[in-house]
Image: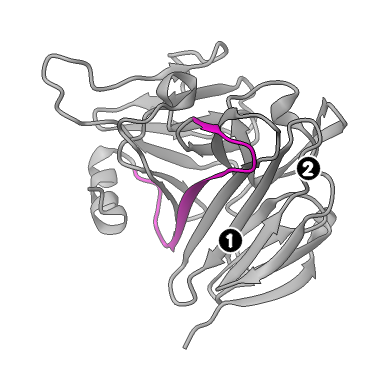
Amino acid sequence: MADTRLKETEYKEFGKCVEISNGTVSLLVTVESGPRIIRYGFVGKDNMFCEKSKDSKPSLGGDFKIRGGHRLWHSPEQMPRTYIPDNNPVQWHTIENGISVTQETEKWTQIKKEMEISLNPSEDRVKIVHKLTNKNAWPVEYAVWALSMMAPGGLQVIPQPRRDTGLLPNRMISLWPYSKMNDERVCWGEKYILFKQIPGMAPPFKLGLPNEDGWVAYFNYGSLFIKRFSFIESAKYPDYGSSYETYTDDCMMEMESLSPLNKVMPDATISHVEEWDLIDGVDKPRDESEIEAIVKKYIKVK
């Protein structure tokens, strides 16, 4: 019978990590900085996440190191609030089939970050509970923001909303100032948005939308990565109603899900859950008919 195993290990320049594995897939969670999941992939195979150990951005209290992997932020994005460095060691303890990782309260924002990371022992499914606690003496409005930096060269598939709203519009796209509608990396399909990561293509591109289906997919290295999350139709989301955002540049693609915006009272915590699946032996789809077959087989969209 399969089980979930934990062990401490060193990983490249990222230092001490905790490995979570069921023998088929493994995650590496940094403990000398973070909270951050720096690796997710099949044992002995490629990392589905991008690693950017040398890049950094000047911010309040030091340089924010990009690092790569999967991280936790609070939205809306703002400098310097969003880019408070996460360079110090984190506290961690075991939970069922995984670990909980907690950052010390950010000194400038007074928000505390925590991730509960668990791996199903018999299925290649990861569950991450992202938590943000307001340690200020007053309410603060923010959303939980879960970001995965994916390795280059892949193809992302994003479902478009398909609700029948009669004479009213049923789709909304948020675009950032640097995003060009004719960018060759984006295909605006009938049911899906196809988004390619092209190594070396430097101009950034970012879009957001209300992802009502609650999933996105990324194809790379002959594998399929599925990110699942909830969507609340009546809720208020950041960035003109975006429950999902995605960004690419010359070396990675970011897949970002968000919770609704909440006015969080002092000492209160809001959380946001993602579930990940990793499936081997799935090639990149060439058109929407192939996407439909993959969705029916692996994603089972509602």
Location of residue 81 (image quadrant) = top right
Q: Residue at x 61, y 49 (%)?
A: 49
Please rate how many residues cluster around mark 1, counting C-alpha atoms within 10 Å: few if below 14, some from 14 to 19, many from 20: many
Q: Which residues are magenta?
A: 262-285
Main SS of residues in magenta: strand
Task: State the residue in front, 212 or 11.
Answer: 212
Q: Amino acid at mark 1?
A: Ile
Q: Earlier in the sequence, mark 1 or mark 2?
A: 2
The image shows residue 16, relative to residue 160, as above or below, that is below
Please rate how many residues cluster around mark 2, counting C-alpha atoms within 10 Å: few if below 14, some from 14 to 19, many from 20: many
**Magenta run includes residue 279:** yes
Query: Can you give x and y, in whole percent of width and height, for residue 100 in the image?
Result: 64, 62
* Residue ID for mark 1: 117
- Discs 1, 2 touching: Cβ within 8 Å: no
The image shows residue 90, relative to residue 97, as above or below, that is above
* Residue ID for mark 2: 86
